[in-house]
Image (cartoon, rainbow, N blue to C red):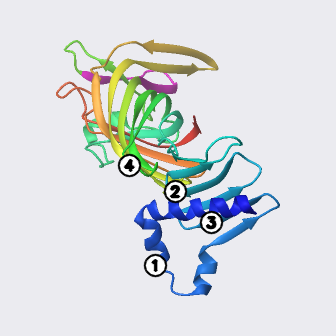
Amino acid sequence: MRLILQNSVWVFVLLLILPGSMFAQQDTLQSRGRLKNIVSVEEDIHRTRVKFPGGDVEVDEMNDTITKIRVGRRRYEIIDKPGHHTRIQMVREPLDAFKGHWSGFDLGLTNFFSTPFDSKLPEEDMWMDLNAGKSVSVSMNLLQYSIGLQKERDNFGLVTGVGWTINNYRFDTRYIMIRDDDGYTTYREATRNIEKNKLVTSYLTVPLLMEFQLPASKGDKDFFVSAGVYGGFRLGSHTKVVYSDDGDREKEKGRDDYNINTFKYGVMARVGYKWLKLYAQCDLTPMIEAGRGPEVYPWIVGVTLVNF
């Protein structure tokens, strides 16, 4: 009992030097009934803990650190070891690091705009019309770097990293992409029965996203939304055509750059709630170099299968 009384004096002294925000919270209490709803007390044989908005006070007789006071990220400890003087130390609790939602595996459907956010292709470019249900994008976002932008919270910041995106554009026509003798991206009509006709591109992708998460307090963040821009560097491209004649299948691959832009950039948005995570992105640069072929802008909508 003497020990608890001695520490109560220390608690009183420390409360006098704590930030004024604690007293501001207490001043707003208008009645004893409201105080009971805000302040809670936990007790067992050796420990008493009082919780209040923004902090708590704990007295533990079985530990050398017999009194702990926490307000926000500040924690005060009163330590009393036998044969030593009682001392007070302040400990700044580490803030959980902000972690964004970029790294992982994405799966999406891709298609073309004739101009950004206009899905109808011009008549002369209809040879690039896609089978929307079979045009698939796969992204492996292997590296991520998160930058928190708040001192007292961990739910807002910038996210960047590196990913590898493979786009499969499945054409819904009999026209096969080629590059003619003048270096122009155009097409030729197939004279055989086509089973599969697609263009494959792969890009190294670097995003720069601003992300906001809820709840704002420490712990798991169930909801997030992020938006920003990305840049891409083309790693490769090729066409693949599968012919099917009387049950016989024959594959034909064309390895060329088809005037596809080496560099690109676009806008991206990502949103998630618990296990469900969706994303959408649109290139703001045409897929094919200006003046060298049809003007189309790829876009993707999809879901994140795995985050890590």
| 66 shown above or below 11 | above
Query: From the viewer's perspective, is residue 164 above or below residue 300?
Result: above
Q: What is the CA distance from the residue labelled 2 to the residue labelled 3? A: 17 Å
- Circle number at residue 27: 1
Find disc 4 in the rendering and name its residue: 150
> Badge 4: how crowded within 10 Å, few (<14), some, or many (20+)?
few
Percent across and percent down for residue 92 are: 49, 45
Please tell me which of labels 1 and 4 falls first in the chain.
Answer: 1
Residue interval drawn in magenta: 185-201
Give the foreground label among 2 and 1.
1
Q: Earlier in the sequence, mark 2 or mark 1?
A: 1
Q: CA distance from mark 2 to mark 4?
A: 12 Å
**Type of amino acid at the residue the image marks with label 1:** Asp
The amino acid type of the residue labelled 4 equals: Gln
Q: CA distance from mark 3 to mark 4?
A: 25 Å
Q: CA distance from mark 1 to mark 3?
A: 16 Å
- Give the label on residue 217, or none: 2
Q: Tag 4, which secondary structure? A: loop
Q: CA distance from mark 1 to mark 4?
A: 28 Å
Tag 2: residue type?
A: Ser
Q: Are marks 2 and 4 in contact (CB under 8 Å)?
A: no
